[in-house]
Image (spheres, helix red, strand yellow):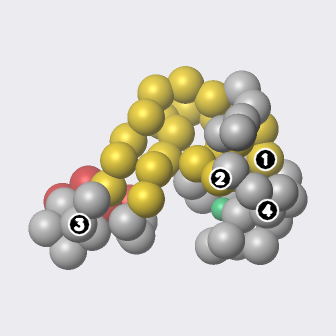
Amino acid sequence: MIEKACLKCKRIVTGKQCPICKTSKLSTKWKGLLIILDAKESKIAEKMNLTEGKYALKVK
Ligand SMILES: [Zn+2]
């Protein structure tokens, strides 16, 4: 399955729309991978207001 990145929140999505923003604006042109395992323990997640999941660092 192709992994796409949401243009809005940068979450890596495998379906047709982002489960967070409910947008279908997804891009296959993304670079870098940020994995948030525990949002409560992660300072990056706290700073960027992210929940658990995979995120792209750059989305075109
Ligand atoms: Zn999104």
Q: Which residue is mark 2?
A: 13
Rounded to the nearest whole Å, what is the CA distance between mark 1 and mark 3?
A: 24 Å
Residue at position x 19%, y 61% in the image: 42
Looking at the rendered structure, the secondary structure element under dot 2 is strand
Q: x%, y% of residue 23?
A: 81, 65
Tags 2 and 1 in contact by the CB under 8 Å rule? Answer: yes
For ligand 1, the image quadrant comes to bottom right
Q: Is residue 10 visible?
A: no
Distance of label 4 from label 2 (alpha carbons): 7 Å
Q: Is residue 33 left or right of residue 4?
A: left
Q: Examine the rendering and report whether any part of residue 14 can be seen.
A: yes
Q: Which residue is mark 1?
A: 26
Amino acid at circle 2 = Val
Q: Are marks 3 and 4 in contact (CB under 8 Å)?
A: no
Q: For the residue marked with disc 4, what is the amino acid? A: Gln
Q: Secondary structure at mark 3?
A: loop
User: What amino acid is found at the position of numbered circle 1 in the picture?
Assistant: Leu
Q: Earlier in the sequence, mark 4 or mark 1?
A: 4
Q: Confirm or deny contact between disc 4 and disc 2 (CB under 8 A).
A: yes
Q: Relative to residue 24, is residue 15 drawn left or right? A: left
Q: What residue is shown with label 3?
A: 38
Q: Is mark 2 within 8 Å of ligand 1?
A: yes
User: Which residue position holds label 4?
Assistant: 17
**Measuring 70% from the left and 39% from the top, which residue is drawn there?**
1
Determine contact: label 4, label 1, CB under 8 Å. Answer: yes
